[in-house]
């Protein structure tokens, strides 16, 4: 059995402060790297080109010169329940303001097995 989680972030960076935002990749990308290091088999980090997050008053759009901190981002992970639980526990600090959707009992098919 595998677990699929989707983590929706309310801002591109969990860290506060201009230097942290400039020096580190966005939270979804940083956590995708951590998932790889922990052996989680699949991860997909997406950064929206337009959208909104909880509490927004308008739709944000991507502009290369002025990327909004409120642009939505998401990290999707697929792995064994123990792997996912260990990952979530270890990354608790970065997930304080995130929304997590967990799907269990999902069937996974390899393309060659269809």
Image (spheres, rainbow, N blue to C red):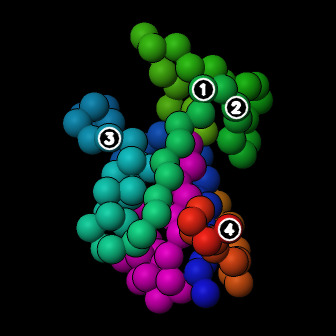
Going from the N terminus, do you reach mark 3 or mark 2 first? 3
Left or right: 36 in relation to 87: left
Taking the spot 61% from the left edge, 71% from the top edge, the residue there is 113
**Measured Cα–Cα span from mark 3 to mark 2:** 20 Å
Question: Label 1's element?
Answer: loop
**Measured Cα–Cα span from mark 4 to mark 3:** 37 Å
Which residue carries the number 1 mark? 49
- In the rendered image of this protein, does residue 31 appear above or below residue 86? above
Taking the spot 27% from the left edge, 41% from the top edge, the residue there is 24
Frontmost of labels 1 and 2 is: 1
Instruction: Tell me which segment is drawn in magenta.
Output: 73-96
Give the number of the disc on residue 25: 3
Q: Nearer the viewer, residue 68 or 76?
A: 76
Give the number of the disc on residue 114: 4
Q: Is residue 77 magenta?
A: yes
Q: Are marks 1 and 2 in contact (CB under 8 Å)?
A: yes
Image quadrant where residue 114 sits: bottom right
Asked if residue 70 shows in the view, the reply is no
Frontmost of labels 4 and 3 is: 4
Frontmost of labels 4 and 1 is: 4
Question: Label 4's element?
Answer: loop
Q: Residue 88: where, in percent of width, then height?
A: 47, 75
- In the rendered image of this protein, does residue 72 appear above or below residue 37? above
- In the rendered image of this protein, does residue 56 appear above or below residue 98? above
């Amino acid at each position: 059995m595998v677990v699929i989680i989707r983590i929706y972030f309310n801002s591109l960076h969990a860290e506060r402060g201009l230097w942290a935002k400039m020096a580190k990749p966005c939270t979804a990308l940083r956590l995708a790297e951590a998932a790889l290091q922990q052996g989680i088999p699949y991860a997909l980090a997406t950064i929206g080109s337009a959208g909104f997050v909880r509490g927004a008053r308008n739709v944000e759009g991507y502009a290369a010169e002025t990327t909004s901190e409120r642009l939505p981002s998401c990290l999707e992970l697929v792995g064994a329940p123990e792997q996912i639980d260990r990952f979530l526990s270890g990354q608790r600090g970065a997930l304080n303001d995130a929304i997590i959707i967990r799907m269990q009992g999902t069937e996974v098919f390899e393309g060659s097995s269809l």
